[in-house]
Image: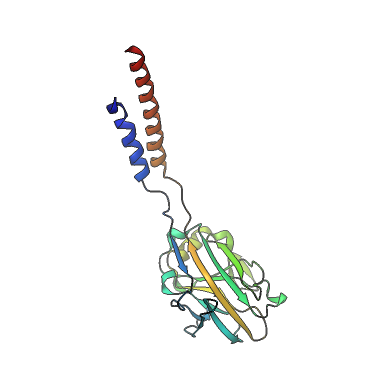
Amino acid sequence: MRKLFTAPIAALALAAAAPTAHAATTISSTFDTGAEGWTFGSYLGFGGIGVTWDSASQAIVKPNHGFGDFGFIASSAYLGDKSDFLNGTFSFDLAASAPSAQYANRPPLVLTGANGKVIFADSLGLPSPGFTTFSIKLNASSFYSGSPTGTRTNVSASQFEAILADLEQVQVWGDWSPSVETARLDNVAMAANAGVPEPATWALMIMGFGGAGAALRRRRVAVAAI
């Protein structure tokens, strides 16, 4: 009787082992022991400014800064070809000591791709003096090009995918007030879309379940004939 189940079981095993459209992957920075390669700078070309690691809150801090359009610059772990993260998310906890309502339209995330192409994430409001969680979907509909607070141009799917395939800089916005302020960042995560099985995987699964059902029917017939 065991032989009747060999083929469907093999098909199900192949389906389980088959690749999905996107493997689940996450790049994260929790700042539990240090700055983890993050710095402070701007998409305008400035960077490499040191940040302070706060051991009490286990976050990185840029205290008393008065820089416009500046923010936290991601480590090299977030750069290069990140095509697998298309339709995934980029999330983080952010705090600003003196958030101003006139800065509520600022982009929480800035991506710079090959040849210096810059795109900005749609505004999600202000961070609070305590930490606020931001989560941005990594697709074209969540970003625009042009000016962070002026003229905006929609980003096409092909443009976004080209930038994601060759990330040169990732900036979490840190300028939320016209006055001097302190910005804090924690719990950064760049997560890929969990993905769905490929069509071939679905075919193997259907074949496996169908074969298992047929084998069970044959087994019942064989038992009834004894």
Position of 102 compared to 35: left or right? right
State the residue in front, 157 or 94: 94
Of 85 and 148, the residue lying toward us: 85
Left or right position of 6 against 67: left
Where residue 202 appears, as percent x and y from the top left, is: 42, 39
Residue 204, percent from left and from top: 37, 37
The residue nearer to you, when weighing 117 against 197, is 197
**Residue 53 visible in the shown view:** yes
Location of residue 155 with respect to 213 vertically, above or below:
below
Count of picture labels:
0
User: Which residue is located at x 33 percent, y 41 percent?
Assistant: 14
Query: Image quadrant of residue 10?
Result: top left
In the image, is residue 70 above or below residue 24?
Answer: below
Residue sitting farthest toward the left: 3
Tell me which residue sits at (58%, 59%) in the image: 141
- At a point 70% along the width and 78% down the height, the residue shown is 100
Above or below, 9 against 169 in this view is above
Asked if residue 127 lies left or right of residue 116, the reply is right
Q: Position of residue 171 (x, y in %)?
A: 52, 74
Residue 19 picture location, percent across and down: 37, 48
The quadrant in which the C terminus is found is top left
In which quadrant is the N terminus drawn?
top left
